[in-house]
Image: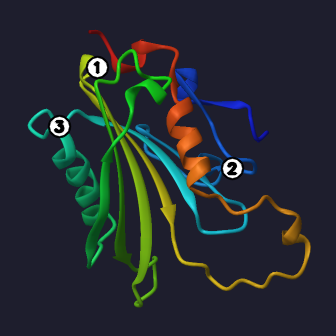
Amino acid sequence: MEPTRACPLFGGAFSAIFPHGAIDVSDLRPVPDNQEVFCHPRTDKSLIVELLELQAHMQGEAAARYHFEDVGRVQGSRVLQVQSVQPLNLESLALRGCCQEAWVLSGKLQVAKENQQVAKDVTLHQALLRVPPYQTDLLVTFNHPPPDNRSSVGPENLSPPSWNLGDFEQLVTSLTLHDPSIFGPQ
């Protein structure tokens, strides 16, 4: 994937700019229809875009915390720690026309990988884009696990650099809706 090319998501209903080298996980294994998942070719970092039901009973920072806690519960996290929650400037978003509220949360989860007993701290950065006209909470997650101490010799040194918060921000701000029919009849 080119570093500055918009990648189609959800059958072209959305697009966003992903970092160089992002691998579409749906080419490797099944992914739920409401998710688009991309992984880094050399690290365990991943980027996930999810279309979720609007949690209208939650507002503001509480909505961001709700989704963080839900992800932690689904991943079987033993510890949840929110480090920061900040409002996101709507003017910086390509979705500013339909997004009525946006938050960025950073936190840590303690999770064990499949078939592993030892849990590790994983840093999550999440952007919650609230789209009430379509009854949708759009959640973008950047999973940033600790380094796995893989060897740094060999051809993998030619792979793209590790992702950072700038890559996450570019994805979030470039996320564009092209086809509102993805949300069904309104």
Query: Residue drawn 78% across and 85% down?
Result: 151
Gap between marks 3 and 1 measured at Cα:
12 Å
Mark closer to the chain start, 2 or 3 = 2
The answer to whether residue 14 is above or below residue 180 is below
Secondary structure under the numbered disc 2 in the rendered image:
loop
Mark closer to the chain start, 2 or 1 = 2
Q: Which residue lies furthest to the bottom in this view?
A: 118
Gap between marks 2 and 3 measured at Cα:
30 Å
Which of the pair 87/137 is nearer the observer? Answer: 87
The answer to whether residue 91 is above or below residue 111 is above
Query: Residue drawn 50% across and 23% down?
Result: 94
Q: On the image, numbered disc 3 is attached to which residue?
A: 55
Residue 110 picture quarter: bottom left
Q: On the image, numbered disc 2 is attached to which residue?
A: 22
Secondary structure under the numbered disc 1 in the rendered image:
helix
Tell me the amino acid under the disc marked 2.
Answer: Ala
